[in-house]
Image (cartoon, helix red, strand yellow):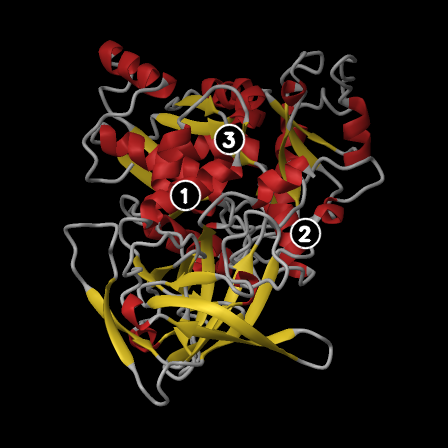
Amino acid sequence: MSENEETKTTNFITEIIEEHNETGRFDGKVHTRFPPEPNGYLHIGHAKSICLNFGLAQQYGGKTNLRFDDTNPLKENIEFVDSIQRDVQWLGFQWDGEVLYASDYFDQLYEFAVQLVQAGKAYVDDQSAEEIREQRGSLTKPGVNSAYRNRSIEENLDLLKRMRAGEFEDGSRVLRAKVDMSSPNVNMRDPIMYRILRADHHRTGDDWCIYPTYDFAHGQSDSIEGITHSICTLEFEDHRPLYDWYLHNLEIHHPQQIEFARLNMSYTLMSKRKLGVLVNEGIVDGWDDPRMPTIAGIRRRGVRPEAVRDFCDRIGVAKTNSVIDYALFQHTVRQDLDPICKRVMAVLKPLKLVIDNFPEREEIDFKVDYFRHDNERHETRKVVLTKEVYIEEDDFMEEPPPKYFRLAPGREVRLMNACLVTCTGVVKDGDGKVVEIHCRYDPDSLGGQAPDGRRVKGTLHWVSAEKNVDATVNLYENLFTVENPSDVPEDGDFRDNLNPNSKMVLEGVKLEAEMAQADPGDRYQFMRQGFFYLDPESTVGNKMVFNQIVPLRDSWAKINQKG
């Protein structure tokens, strides 16, 4: 939800907030936070969380913190920190105050750990990670108490201080909360609070050799910052009792954790780890590859932040996980672009058409509206008709099937905004491929209308062969061929579902001559093709590179579902 939207959103989370405001639980305050782990680029699922957290605070006149959960230095780096800040701001939001980090609270978190040890509610365990995992039990089998669970408070304090001082090897000991090994909630079976890990941290360097787990750092960081409503996705629902246990036993400010359904979208992965595999193995061209569902990739493709916010608003806030059809996202993007994009002609796969009865070296100019769909906008450009033009290769067939309304031998079609032409012959290469079409035009049809009112079904876009601009166009299909890319056999791999045709690079695309005035970052509708974005990061010198934002129709997924 943007700052200018006045309509109040209503959902089960706002109902909880309204109840809190009525009871005075947080003195009418709403203070949210967005807490990403800087171990990859954010994806569109995170966009939903960003819009929700910042939107709730805006709706209730509150605040939102941006806090990085930087408790695992092995996976984090400053590149991800910077990218996340760019993504939040690109979506149209600004956090309150300075950027915050869980590492800001490492000293306080350690003191919280000491406090729990002193209260007899935490202990140092010498077991290996595998032993702890085995003794934790399963959903049907209760856990088993560690042999170290009943160490004295004094011994635990001593061992914790020595862990902090770096006396022990990595992985040799952990600090665990003493909760309940027989709890039906596995998360409550003496969870790990601290582990020994010698790794350089992007902010604290080598100051620490023990690091808190997410479950321990998360709630206490919320508390320290005075967060009132900790909005999480549903996978944290079973973690909420532990979140509450820590805050209750530490007797500190206690935010309310609320879970909502995460955004899952068909033909798309929402796992930073798996997306990182695609990047690291060179399967895609980086985190901002336009095929990626990352916010950076969506931005590079040319989608506007308004469309992403609108999409998040459309899907709403639910309590149950579901899969959103990717076609809805495309539809939302298309609706956002349709009113604002200029219409131009671009021939992606050029085939030369020669108008035999058109005078040599003559040019006919037509003034054509950029926004023929909008009666209130009257911006025009000059389109030049010459003896030779380019049409789409797919717009001609020698032996057309029934209901084929494009160009064929003896058939008349309309060159959009220009004239009517009739095919009189073709030129083929040595392999029998048509490389040139010959036509005659009706001089009385200039402007594209039949003078006698005869009906012409086919209308083709075209570009002058003499007056045009060369460009490169990147066409995209879904990155995966199946609706749920993670759904693979036990011995399979999500990469088995990659679409080998997810990107097609077209060189030698022909654009209207007026497109020479286009600026990097401009968006257009290529007539009969789709919406395209002049990529500012790929445009060097006079070379223009356009990324396909979205096609005109959601045909690809539907065709594959039927096939």
Per the image, the residue denoted by label 2 is: 499
Residue 207: quadrant of the picture = bottom right
| CB-based contact (under 8 Å), mark 2 and mark 1 | no
The residue shown at (42%, 52%) is 457
Per the image, the residue denoted by label 1 is: 67
Q: Position of residue 446 (x, y in %)?
A: 28, 69
**Residue 231 vertical placement versus 188 (above, below):** below
Between residue 245 and residue 555, name the one nearer to us: 555
- Name the quarter where the N terminus is drawn: top left
Confirm whether residue 132 shows in the render.
yes
Q: Residues within 10 Å of mark 3 (few under 14, many from 20)?
A: many
The residue shown at (25%, 71%) is 366
Q: Secondary structure beneath disc 1?
A: strand
**Residue 268 vertical placement versus 415 (above, below):** above
Residue furthest out toward the front: 452
Between residue 213 and residue 559, name the one nearer to us: 559
- Name the quarter where the C terminus is drawn: top right
Separation (CA) of disc 2 from disc 1: 36 Å
Per the image, the residue denoted by label 3 is: 262
Q: Position of residue 361 (x, y in %)?
A: 34, 90
**Residue 437 vertical placement versus 62 (above, below):** below
Q: Is residue 422 left or right of residue 180?
A: left
Q: Nearer the viewer, mark 2 or mark 3?
A: 2
